[in-house]
Amino acid sequence: MTRTPAPPPERHRLSIRLVFDDSGMMGPGKAELLERIARCGSIAAAGREMGMSYKRAWMLIETLNAMFREPLVERVRGGPGGGGAELTPAGQEVLALYRAIVAEAEAAGQERLEAMRALLK
Amino acid sequence: MTRTPAPPPERHRLSIRLVFDDSGMMGPGKAELLERIARCGSIAAAGREMGMSYKRAWMLIETLNAMFREPLVERVRGGPGGGGAELTPAGQEVLALYRAIVAEAEAAGQERLEAMRALLK
DNA sequence: CCGCGATATGTTTGACGAAACATAACGAGA
DNA sequence: TCTCGTTATGTTTCGTCAAACATATCGCGG
């Protein structure tokens, strides 16, 4: 069997990736991760929900924090629950912007998108 | 050196990929290939321009032709110039639709896109 | 009929990224 | 001080995808 722990961004009508030349990129994966971190309060839990290893989730966050002027995720080691992570204001803003861009783009392209879908097999 | 024969879709503000669940997907790469085939009149020449092997270009077209009801590219073997390929009406329509969707999406998201870019390092 | 330029495929090799595995360190609370 | 859950990293294994390499076929024109 090939296994399917983390099915790629399937079942989306429009998959949008923001590409900033040489500064990195941000797509559905990192956005969802940010969202789940905000809800879960930890990188580990968010990663588990998405079926990815902690290391992978951690690396994605590392990348995000490095590509913006201010970190998007603040991490805390140790403590009552062992530690945790949460979105900074910058993180919340970036996530909101991404969601908005996707929503606008989907709305704008919906009509022609449907036309193309009609040509599919 | 790592070599850069076919630099990924860089220098784009917005990278958009149409994802049709289980029917396949279409992004900037296939779109550009279609465009060049229309101009060049052959898969081989189009692929060369994009720095990809003929085989790869051929496979991409094979995939596209398979995912739509009608083939997007018509191929001809042999002949004066050895053969060639051109877009079918369906191919032209799909390409136009894709370009339109991208343009609309970029226009729609431009403002917030700029806001996010301001947060970059 | 032979060669050219393109389509059409199979096979092999290799590079890259993801996954798996393995630890270390942290810090509050019991 | 010992545990617990998390952050933080290093190392190794592995699967996948792309490139490279190698042919075969086609069909007109010279």
Image (cartoon, coloured by chain):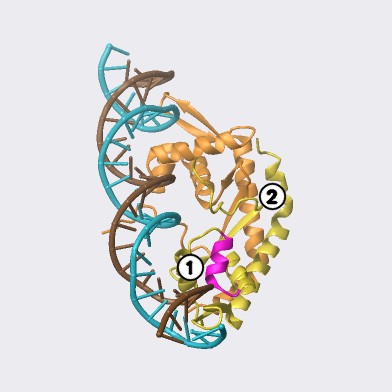
Chain colours: A orange, B yellow, C brown, D cyan
Picture layout, residue B80 above or below residue C26: below
Could you classify mark 2 by the number of other residues whose Cα lies within 10 Å: few (under 14), some (14-19), or many (20 or more)? some
Q: Is residue B49 magenta?
A: yes
Question: Circle 1 — which element?
Answer: helix
Read off the residue under disc 1: B60
Q: Position of residue B1 (x, y in %)?
A: 50, 40
Which residue occupies 46% across, 73% down? B62
Residue C30: x and y in percent read 32, 21
Where is residue A48 shown, x and y percent of the image?
Answer: 38, 44
Q: Quadrant of residue A53?
A: top left
Residue D5 horizontal/vertical position (percent) = 36, 32
Q: Are marks 2 and 1 on the same chain?
A: yes
Q: Give the magenta part as a residue range.
A: B41-50
Chain of the residue displaying label 1: B
Q: Is residue A14 visible?
A: no
Q: Nearer the viewer, residue D8 or A85?
A: D8
Give me the C-alpha separation between circle 2 and circle 1: 30 Å
Residue A20 shows in this picture:
yes
Q: Nearest the camera: A19 or B22?
A: A19
SS type, badge 2? helix
- For disc 1, the neighbor class at 10 Å (few under 14, some 14 to 19, many from 20) is some
- D26 displayed left or right of B92: left
Q: Is C19 placed left or right of B90 in the picture?
A: left
Q: Which mark is residue B113?
A: 2
Q: Give the main secondary structure of the magenta stretch.
A: helix
Question: Disc 2: which chain?
Answer: B
Amino acid type of disc 1? Leu
- Could you tell me which quadrant the N terminus of chain A lies in? bottom left
**Residue A62 sits above or below residue B112 on the image:** above
